[in-house]
Amino acid sequence: MTGRRGTGGRILARAVARNRRRLGIGSFLIGMHQACEALVPILIGLVIDRAVATGDRTQLVLWIAALAVLFLVLTTVFRVGARQLVAAIAGEAHELRLEIAARIMHPRSTGASSSGWRPSW
């Protein structure tokens, strides 16, 4: 990384630092979603072993309810996690647009082109 202000690495580091809370929460929740996805075949195996193979209807209802709870958690953590990540992306994009506009609008901005034209704002 060079000493220039605004290099790609510095912009990325600043974006991550500004959004660390949302990125952390969103990443954790998306990780939880992946863990729940991995548990689905395990739980289906348990349903078959403990309820279907034995023919116990009470166990079947309990294990199907457990599967429903797993899917509820799976979808909820994905929705909330994705919302956090998208909010971080949208918020950072807005911040970058504001910084660019402020830099362009600054009285000391070098908005002149080689022909001497300056924006009218």
Image: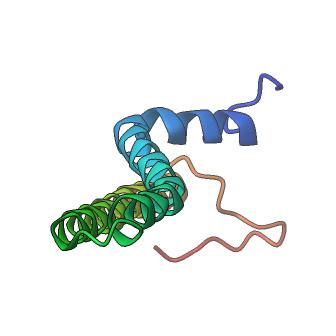
Nearer the observer, 44 or 18: 44
Question: Which residue lies most toward the left here?
Answer: 58
Whether residue 105 is visible: no
The N terminus, quarter of image: top right
Question: Is 36 left or right of 80, judged from the image as shown?
Answer: right
Nearer the observer, 53 or 74: 53
Question: Total of numbered circles in the picture?
Answer: 0
Say how the picture is coloured.
Answer: rainbow
Question: Is 51 left or right of 116, judged from the image as shown?
Answer: left
Question: Is 45 left or right of 9, judged from the image as shown?
Answer: left
Q: Quadrant of residue 66?
A: bottom left
Which residue lies at the image location 41% right of the left edge and 54% below the top edge?
Answer: 88
Nearer the observer, 93 or 25: 25
Q: Position of residue 30 (x, y in %)?
A: 46, 53
1 relative to 57, above or below: above
Which residue lies at the image location 70% right of the left edge and 63% below the top edge?
Answer: 112
66 relative to 2, above or below: below
Q: Position of residue 77 (x, y in %)?
A: 33, 57
Q: Position of residue 92 (x, y in %)?
A: 45, 54
108 relative to 24, above or below: below
Which residue lies at the image location 52% right of the left edge and 38% below the top edge?
Answer: 16
Question: Which residue lies most toward the front here?
Answer: 54
Q: Quadrant of residue 70?
A: bottom left
Nearer the observer, 113 or 13: 13
Which residue lies at the image location 73% right of the left edge and 42% below the top edge?
Answer: 8
Whether residue 63 is visible: yes
Q: Position of residue 108 (x, y in %)?
A: 54, 46
